[in-house]
Amino acid sequence: MAKLSKSPANTDIQFTPELTPKQMLQLGIFGGLYFQKMPKEYPREWFTKAKLSHDGKPHKELNYFKVLASQSLAVWQAKGWIHPQDPHGWFEWYCRYSMGRRTRDDERQIKRWSAMRRHVAQIQNNCQVGDVYCRPRQRQALLHWAYDSRKI
């Protein structure tokens, strides 16, 4: 389980991500497209074994479950899920949160993270324990949200 402190404003919300941003980048998320270059605001060691796309396109081979399971940034913007402080979305927020930043957007983002638990239940109800090839798109989507479905 990732070790993160809770925001004082969110002490009533259970936020227990299972993976750190570094672990997520090393496992393979967003087709390697989330960061094309290593942002200077994050620790260098996050990127030593990160699976990144270098041509501006997502590659399913860079994802842990070898499937694409993301919507485009344009879709996220159209749905109102993107706020100006984190123009690349939830994972950017999570990276900054894991480094100690706290904002008024924390509660919204944590609620969005919590809503992904429905996918954990679907995997538990439809897959045999340890069968990581069952529902790979859902498993990859969970990985994007710091859930480690390899344990389900």
Image (spheres, rainbow, N blue to C red):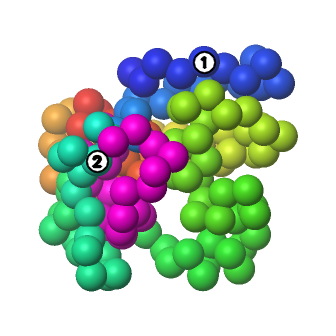
* Eye-nearest disc, 1 or 2: 2
Taking the spot 55% from the left edge, 52% from the top edge, the residue there is 92
Disc number placed over residue 39 in the picture, else none: none
Vertical placement of residue 143 versus 52, above or below: above
Quadrant of the snapshot with the N terminus = top left
Q: Which residue reaches farthest front?
A: 40
Nearest to N terminus: mark 1 or mark 2: 1
The x, y position of residue 111, in whole percent, is 70, 41
What range of the chain is rendered magenta? 23-44
**Are the residues at dot 1 and dot 2 in contact (C-beta closer than 8 Å)?**
no
Query: Which three-letter amino acid code belongs to the residue tagged 2?
Result: Phe
The x, y position of residue 22, in whole percent, is 34, 39
Taking the spot 46% from the left edge, 51% from the top edge, the residue there is 40
Residue pointed to by mark 1: 5
Asked if residue 40 can be seen in this view, the reply is yes
Disc number placed over residue 47 in the picture, else none: 2
Judge from the rendering whether residue 70 lies leftward or rightward of residue 9; answer left or right. Answer: left
As helix, strand or loop, the secondary structure at mark 2 comes to helix
The x, y position of residue 33, in whole percent, is 36, 69
Vertical placement of residue 85 versus 69, above or below: above
Quadrant of the snapshot with the C terminus = top left
Q: Residues within 10 Å of mark 1 (few under 14, many from 20)?
A: few
Vertical placement of residue 99 versus 42, above or below: above
Q: CA distance from mark 1 to mark 2?
A: 23 Å
